Amino acid sequence: MSFLERQFGLKAQGTTLRTEALAGLTTFLTMAYIVIVNPAILGQAGMPVAAVAAATCISAGIGCILMGLIANYPIALAPGMGLNAYFTYTVVLGMGVPWQTALGCVFLSGVAFLVLTVAGIRQLIVGAIPRPLFSAVAAGVGLFIAFIGLKEAGIIVANPATTVALGDLTKPTAILALAGLLVIGALMAWRVKGAILIGILIIAGAGALMGLSKVAPGGYSLAELSATAFQLDIPGALHLNGAMGMAMAEIIFVFLFVDLFDNVGTLVAVTKKAGLVAPDGSIPRLNRILTADSVATIAGSLAGTSTVVSYIESASGVQAGGRTGLTAVIVGLLFLATLFFAPLVQAIPAAATAPALILVGAMMIGALKEVDWEDPCVAIPAFLTVITIPLTFSIANGLAFGITSYAVLKLVRGQARISDWLLYLLAALFIARFIYLGGE
């Protein structure tokens, strides 16, 4: 018996090396856009773009390979969309936290995730959060990302009278971004593999012809590619006191919970599609899956990027026949190979990445189909979650409004249960947070 057969059980899953390789390539093409988009977002936090691109490749490579070898699932990982925006716009730019300290918070959230997984506490937390709020958070993050994309494209601009308004669509950046929406949208409509990545590269090429790309001549040293490596400030994330200390705790909480939500939602969707769910509806080796994710987040923070999550794009590889961890390992190897092209992302203009943000956000809205909009006890918290995240530029606020309103509505309906104690504890903490912030 070959090593691959012993490690991944290809025959038992009815697959072959060729099928798994094709599935791995398919998954990689559908999510490779993150190598361009993640540095574009984190770069606005003051992080070196080429170094973040390298960290993105490294963390995705490590995460995918760990997922394949430890959990044996065709699930790929990379720095998460939404959490990278939260990292930049809320934590660094909004709260004034240095990006090194923010990376320290990512590291601590990864350690907390690992501890909760090993201790089995994760199941308690997952059970306490209403499933509709998982979907609402995903959709709210989608709107958050799309809003950022529209802003970066100049399609939406600030307006003192109406808060936001339509921008000047005759400017080159806006024109290119709108063209990017059409190109990527058309490619997606035709089911082209890697539509987002292809669209970004086409618009980047057009941007270069229009003089919008910033191409730095010459080679790049290893020092430049490792400028974010091991720069995280863990003591800074641990030793802040007073209001900032509370803010650090909240940041770690959001990184942890959104990562947890993201993973559970993705795992359910992908494992169902692959037929890997147990007869009782459970996901085999779930702790191994979450262990791989938490270790990848820790590795990502050390390399210099935001939280690593499971990617729903893994479903494309499953559609292509991927059934084992070999698919994930191949995706990981492809990400590591992409490391050599990391410096080139500096030449990608905002007009090319903005359409990707908008359309990735649009696809995340699909999670709302799982919300029962006929039940006010579910619909109201879900809506508050979805609308609060983009309009306050904070995933934490969305979580707070959603969980608190859900708990209150269940309480007034007389549907509170002792078994829901953790939900009500979280709601009480969020209410205390609002009171504390109101007094600042």
Image (cartoon, rainbow, N blue to C red):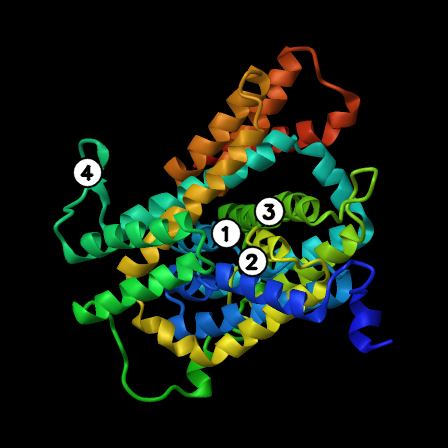
What is the CA distance from the residue labelled 1 to the residue labelled 3?
Answer: 10 Å
Q: Residue at x 45, y 70 (%)?
A: 52
Residue 403 visible in the current orientation: yes
Q: Which residue is mark 3?
A: 262
Task: Judge left or right: residue 89 versus residue 296.
Answer: left
Q: Secondary structure at mark 3?
A: helix
* Dot label at residue 83: 1
Regarding mark 4 in the picture, which secondary structure is present there? strand
SS class of the residue under badge 1? helix
Which mark lies nearer to you, 3 or 2? 3
Q: Amino acid at mark 4?
A: Asn
Q: Looking at the image, which is closer to me, 54 or 10?
A: 10
Amino acid identity at mark 1: Leu
Tag 1 near tag 3, CB within 8 Å: yes
Q: Which residue corresponds to mark 4?
A: 159
Question: How far apart are the alpha carbons under marks 3 and 4?
Answer: 33 Å
In the image, which disc is placed on residue 307?
Answer: 2
Identify the mark nearer the N-term, 2 or 1: 1
User: Foreground: 350 or 201?
Assistant: 201
Residue at the top extreme, as displayed? 413
**Residue 95 appears anywhere in the view:** no
- State how far apart marks 4 and 1 are (Cα): 26 Å
Q: Closer to the N terminus: mark 3 or mark 4? A: 4
Q: Are marks 3 and 4 in contact (CB under 8 Å)?
A: no
Q: Are marks 2 and 1 in contact (CB under 8 Å)?
A: yes
Along the line of sight, the residue nearer the viewer: 179 or 82 = 179
